[in-house]
Amino acid sequence: MTAIDGRDRDVPLTSRSRRGLAGAGTRVLRQPFLQAIVRRALRSAVLLLVVSALTFVLTSLTPGNAAEEMLGSNATPSALAHVRTELGLNLPLWTQYWHWLDKALHGDLGNSLFIGGSVSSLVASRLPVTLSLMIGALIVAGIAGVGLGVLSAVAGPVLGRAVGILSWLGYSVPAFWLAGILIVIFAVNIRLFPVSGYVSLASGVGPWAQSLVLPVAALAIGGIAGIAKQTREAMLDALSSEYIRMARANGIGMRSIVLRHALKNAGSRVVTMVGLLAVSLLGGTVLVETVFALPGLGSLLFTAVQEHDLPVVQGVVMCFMIFIVIINFGVDLAYQWLNPKVGLR
């Protein structure tokens, strides 16, 4: 009788446990934050799929092909046809894309048509250079831009006009032209920094930082101008608001008003500018890495496009798109931190 009672009690207990776990899982999925993450993941997957297809089509439409680049202009038609068959370039475009997509979904981005190594290894070896360049430029532009914008908003109209002129120059001057000027002044004339090349962090922090100063400056100067202008305008709006005037009337110090209230209120506009800058830096790295001969993803993409190395182009573009997805998600998280009433979309 005891065994029967114990068996009878075990069955409902297991059933309740399963119902409890199912209910807990349902409650977790019903949380708005996790639902937003799932929606964002699905949109990002669709975006990556569309961009990969467009990249495949646009690269195939450029003049020339990998077979011609490999054999040269004097190659015979039979030799070109043989290489095209070996590379699979004779297949219909949608078939080539499907073969690439099938491998990519299994973690294989293919092999470079010219270098011969796997695209994943190439991207992984070049990624630290591009990340160092982008993160360095973002940090410099963010700190200098926000600081200059806050200072110009508090100091008065003279510094504000200077920030406006700086912003205009920053938007007008191309990064590659600025890179050339920096090389002439600080590398050729003063000889303070190397003309080109990259030193890995394993060789020492000093040489590594020295090899990145000029490229980071070339990327960051335009961003400093943009962030400073947006920060100044947002700070002026915040400082003229009613609650700031009430804070002043209650005797709160100017430093506390600026740092604790006005700057946080202006944070949304600044975060937007930083996010846009981070995305624009992806395009800037292509030119800056090429000018300074840095072995990053930008210079790899530039070379791959010239050589019609489609697997490398696809791999780098996908890596850049993942960067953009992460940046956009980070911007949304920053919005929610600055204003908890704003939910993820």
Image: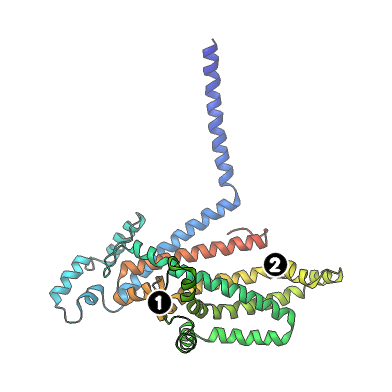
Residue situated in front as seen by the camera: 257 or 29:
257
Residue at horizontal 69 percent and vertical 84 percent from the top? 160
Element on which disc 2 rests: helix
Compared with residue 155, is residue 81 higher up or lower down, i.e. above or below? above
- Which residue matches tag 1? 197
Percent position (x, y) of residue 205? 49, 69
Q: Amino acid at mark 2?
A: Lys
Instruction: State whether residue 117 is above or below residue 175.
Output: above
Residue lying at 35% horizontally and 56% vertically, measured from the top left: 107
- Extreme residue toward the right, this view: 250
Binning the other alpha carbons within 10 Å of mark 1 as few (below 14), some (14 to 19) or many (20 upward) gives: few
Residue at label 2?
264
Q: In the rendered view, does 9 fall on the left or right side of 191?
A: right
Q: Amino acid at mark 1?
A: Gly
Discs 2/1, front? 1
- Disc with the residue nearer the chain's start (2 vs 1): 1
Asked whether 94 or 188 is in front, the reply is: 188
Q: Give the Cα distance between marks 2 and 1.
A: 40 Å
